[in-house]
Image (cartoon, rainbow, N blue to C red):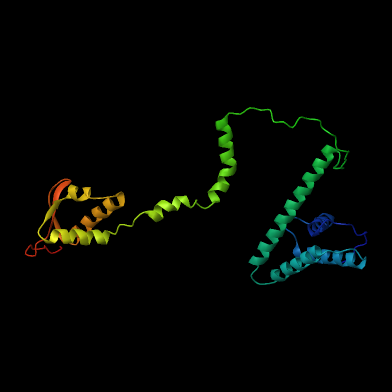
Amino acid sequence: MEKPLYKTEVFEGPLDLLLFLISKHKLNINDIPIFDLVEQYTAYVRQMQEEDLDVSSEFLEMAARLVYIKTVSLLPVQSEAEELKKELTGELIEYRDCKLAAKKLSDRTGGFDLTTRRPMVLLRDPTYDRIHDSADILKAYLQAAGKNFRRLPPPIDSFRRIVAAKIISVGEKMKELAVFLAGGKSVRFQTYLNYSRSRSDLVARFLAVLELCKSKQITVNGAGADFTICARREKEAVPDAQ
């Protein structure tokens, strides 16, 4: 390969250099001959080093990447090489399109020259003079600060009722009812529930009746909600489960 005789240009990065080489040597960007491109790229980077130009690590990294693609292209199975070439082609096409778009914008605006001026002093009354409905202000405040409030832990007061509430044991209610019915007594279901001192006590009594019925320690007589609870007699036969 002949040594480049042109003056080394300054490129923004390795992709810029690759596009330059593809354009100069009229290579197909959609089907890059990786062997030719590796030789051209490494020769150009070597020339940049000989001319004492500042060669950043990006150019050396791209050189290693191209050499690796060339190496895996020599293997019998070239699936990895095709994937790497496809990835590089996509990056080059995307970079080329961005450069073309930037050039079009630059041509339309006459360039991107930056001009500045001294800041102007604006005399304006900073008093907020708009009037809003109080409901709208509250809604806007909740939308702005609501997310932060949701991240805060619940206040201690919200746990006091839970901690202060007496725990009603279903097991204790089962023992209490079994002892009461052991002497041959019976009680109406609704009357038994009316003895409850709290909602928790009511739920515990109801669950106790269900558990004792399930374990066949009590029987119920009657229909609907108005039935009587009594202890199961020992001589009562318990049917076998089918």
Give the quarter of the figure containing the N terminus: bottom right
Across and down, in percent, residue 186 comes to: 12, 54
**Residue under the image location 63 percent in, 27 percent down:** 131
Rendered view: 80 above or below 10: below
Q: Is residue 17 left or right of residue 239?
A: right
User: Does any portion of residue 35 appear in the rendered image?
Assistant: no
Towards the viewer: 147 or 25: 147
Rendered view: 145 above or below 95: above
Towards the viewer: 216 or 231: 231
Across and down, in percent, residue 92 comes to: 74, 55
- The quadrant where residue 10 appears: bottom right
Towards the viewer: 25 or 212: 212
Towards the viewer: 13 or 30: 13
Rendered view: 90 above or below 66: above
Q: Which residue, as the protein is rendered here, is positioned at the far left?
A: 235
Q: Is residue 48 left or right of residue 224?
A: right
User: Does any portion of residue 59 appear in the rendered image?
Assistant: yes
**Residue under the image location 65 percent in, 66 percent down:** 80
Across and down, in percent, residue 113 comes to: 87, 42
**Residue under the image location 73 percent in, 69 percent down:** 68
